[in-house]
């Protein structure tokens, strides 16, 4: 589910864009550790493969068919960081060239699919990928990856105030679970076919996790998904909690003071005042990111 | 295939095509922010933004109807949520969703339709996006249609071998096809990499011309930001 522009409230897309920048930076750095810069063609062509894979239909019963989403398959075959970079590149191309997903909402889509989706898809494989639980791990990972992305997107829409009657919400959740199960089945079938035609292409993770840890991690992700959904369906609950603890007034002071002086008196329009403060904030964040990046890269190279 | 259309559009010539891609990228983001944060008197503002975009499209000598139709690609998805909003008793939000998503898509198309993708990605690089990511994106775009064509061939081949088997068999066959496609793409990537090294690839793509941010670009950026801002302020002052 690619969120177009215009769906998310400004604080939602703004904060997710800000969060996506360091996340993608980290993914790129990790991915380059495993693949040097000259391996960019491999990641790019695998991204093109994910695009093309949408053309191969998988029959799902009477008349309907589904297709591979691919986040978990990439995470298993290329590693999670490289898969995150590939998914980010795909999302950018989709937003720019195919009008599939917005540009301002790119941060939200990247967090949902390229960061959270890919990491959740890799998690069970990381713990169980080497042993006799390999097949369930692949299935569960692909399922989790679709489920996490979809629920996060739904939660962001709900927080942004897109009203949804309970029946629609229930129906879309059922659809998510069904498509997640389909993704699990497709990913498992493709990995198995891949291992018969070209053994060694799908790596085995070093057996470093125990069964219990894997189960705990997967359960934690599932619980978090359910929690996020509940929290976003009833955001008042959180606010009430914050009020009870007396957090919200303090937090508000903390958030508004740094830029309060920017609301210059000569600007009459309340919106223009807010916009200037917001723009000043964006420029500050941008400058901070660039500076931080420079310092870090200088430290690395020296 | 419709990407070819975009390639043709972005290689035409007009004053807008000549502008520095960085100016266009920055102007695009600011315009999108202005659209996204418009709430009061949205209908009037939306009409003004729309007319502004149409004027730019005409100025850029892009085929108007084709671009307007292409931007409507966002509408099916939006329509679902607009309907849900109407059912939930929030028709104003339905209007906001449709208007904002369409205007945003149109603005993106205006920039992508006047800027070849390699130049646009280079602009992102000089604005601070990681080069590795942009290289991957460029490869995705370059091989997208190559691999998609291969997938299309496999689909036709599978259909002509007889696709009337049981669903379980067809599921396995589709999985097998994807696995073959995966392995072929992997091998193709290695061949591409070797060919690039043989031609002296040094870790970054070269543009045919250098990006240059001149006075005209500065003026364009200023006007592109000032026009929607003025529309909005005028409308809010009137409301």
Image: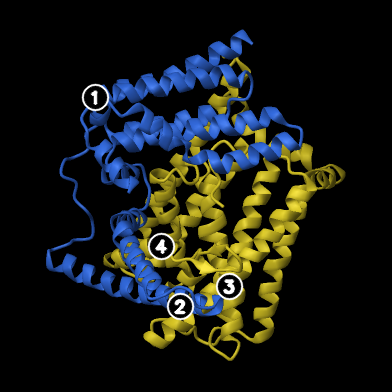
Label 1 SS: helix
Can residue A263 be seen in the rendering of this structure?
no
Q: Quick one: label 1 or label 2, which is nearer the N terminus? A: 1
User: Which chain did the image draw in blue?
Assistant: B
Q: Residue at x 42, y 75 (%)?
A: B162
Tag 4: Cα neighbours inside 10 Å, few (<14), some, or many (≥20)?
Answer: some
Disc number placed over residue A184 in the picture, else none: 3
Query: Residue A129's spot in the image, x, y percent?
Result: 54, 83
Q: Are marks 2 and 3 on the same chain?
A: no
Q: Are marks 1 and 2 in contact (CB under 8 Å)?
A: no
In whole angstroms, how far apart are the C-alphas of marks 1 and 3?
50 Å
Q: Residue at x 31, y 61 (%)?
A: B149
Q: Which residue is mark 2?
A: B173
Q: Judge by depth and name the residue closer to the eye, B198 or A100.
A: A100
Residue A233 position (above or below residue B19): below
Residue B186 position (above or below residue A302): below
Q: Are marks 1 and 3 on the same chain?
A: no
Q: Quick one: label 4 or label 3, which is nearer the N terminus? A: 4
In whole angstroms, how far apart are the C-alphas of marks 1 and 2?
52 Å
A78 left or right, relative to A108: left
Mark whose residue sits in front, 1 or 2: 2
Q: Which residue is mark 1?
A: B15
């Amino acid at each position: 589910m690619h969120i177009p522009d215009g769906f998310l409230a400004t604080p939602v897309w703004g904060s997710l864009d800000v969060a996506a920048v360091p996340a993608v930076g980290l993914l790129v750095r990790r991915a380059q550790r495993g693949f040097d810069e000259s391996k960019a063609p491999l990641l790019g062509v695998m991204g093109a493969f994910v695009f093309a894979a949408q053309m191969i239909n998988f029959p799902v019963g009477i008349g309907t068919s589904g297709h591979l989403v691919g986040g978990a398959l990439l995470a298993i075959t290329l590693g999670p960081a490289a898969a995150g970079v590939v998914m980010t590149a795909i999302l950018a191309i989709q937003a720019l060239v195919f009008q599939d997903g917005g540009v301002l909402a790119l941060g939200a889509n990247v967090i949902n699919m390229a960061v959270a989706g890919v990491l959740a898809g890799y998690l069970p494989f990381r713990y169980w990928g080497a042993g006799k639980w390999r097949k369930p791990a692949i299935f569960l990972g692909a399922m989790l990856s679709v489920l996490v992305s979809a629920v996060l997107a739904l939660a962001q829409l709900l927080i942004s105030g897109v009203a949804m009657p309970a029946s629609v919400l229930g129906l879309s959740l059922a659809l998510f679970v069904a498509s997640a199960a389909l993704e699990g089945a497709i990913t498992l079938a493709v990995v198995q076919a891949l291992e018969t035609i070209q053994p060694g292409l799908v790596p085995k993770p070093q057996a470093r996790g125990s069964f219990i840890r894997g189960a705990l991690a997967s359960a934690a992700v599932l619980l978090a998904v359910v929690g996020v959904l509940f929290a976003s369906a009833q955001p008042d609950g959180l606010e009430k909690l914050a009020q009870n603890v007396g957090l919200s007034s303090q937090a508000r002071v903390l958030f508004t003071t740094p830029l309060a002086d920017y609301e210059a008196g000569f600007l009459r329009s309340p919106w223009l005042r807010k916009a200037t403060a917001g723009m000043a904030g964006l420029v500050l964040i941008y400058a901070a990111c660039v500076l931080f990046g420079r310092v870090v890269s200088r430290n690395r190279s020296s | 295939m419709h990407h070819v259309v975009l390639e043709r559009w972005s290689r035409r010539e007009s004053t807008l095509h000549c502008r520095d891609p960085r100016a266009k990228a920055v102007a695009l983001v600011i315009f999108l922010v202005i659209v996204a944060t418009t709430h009061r008197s949205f209908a009037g503002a939306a009409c003004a933004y729309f007319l502004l975009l149409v004027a730019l499209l005409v100025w850029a000598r892009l085929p108007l109807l084709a671009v307007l139709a292409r931007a409507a690609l966002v509408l099916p998805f939006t329509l679902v949520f607009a309907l849900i909003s109407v059912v939930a008793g929030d028709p104003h939000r339905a209007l906001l969703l449709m208007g904002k998503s369409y205007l945003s898509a149109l603005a993106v198309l205006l920039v992508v339709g006047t800027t070849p993708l390699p130049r646009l990605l280079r602009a992102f690089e000089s604005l601070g996006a990681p080069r590795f990511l942009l290289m991957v994106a460029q490869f995705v775009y370059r091989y997208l249609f190559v691999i998609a064509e291969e997938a299309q061939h496999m689909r036709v081949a599978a259909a002509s071998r007889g696709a009337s088997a049981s669903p379980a068999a067809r599921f396995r066959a589709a999985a097998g096809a994807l696995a073959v496609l995966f392995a072929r793409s992997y091998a193709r990537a290695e061949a591409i990499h070797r060919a690039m090294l043989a031609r002296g690839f040094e870790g970054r793509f070269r543009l045919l011309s250098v990006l240059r941010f001149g006075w005209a670009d500065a003026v364009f950026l200023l006007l592109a930001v000032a026009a929607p801002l003025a529309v909005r302020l005028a409308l809010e002052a009137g409301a």
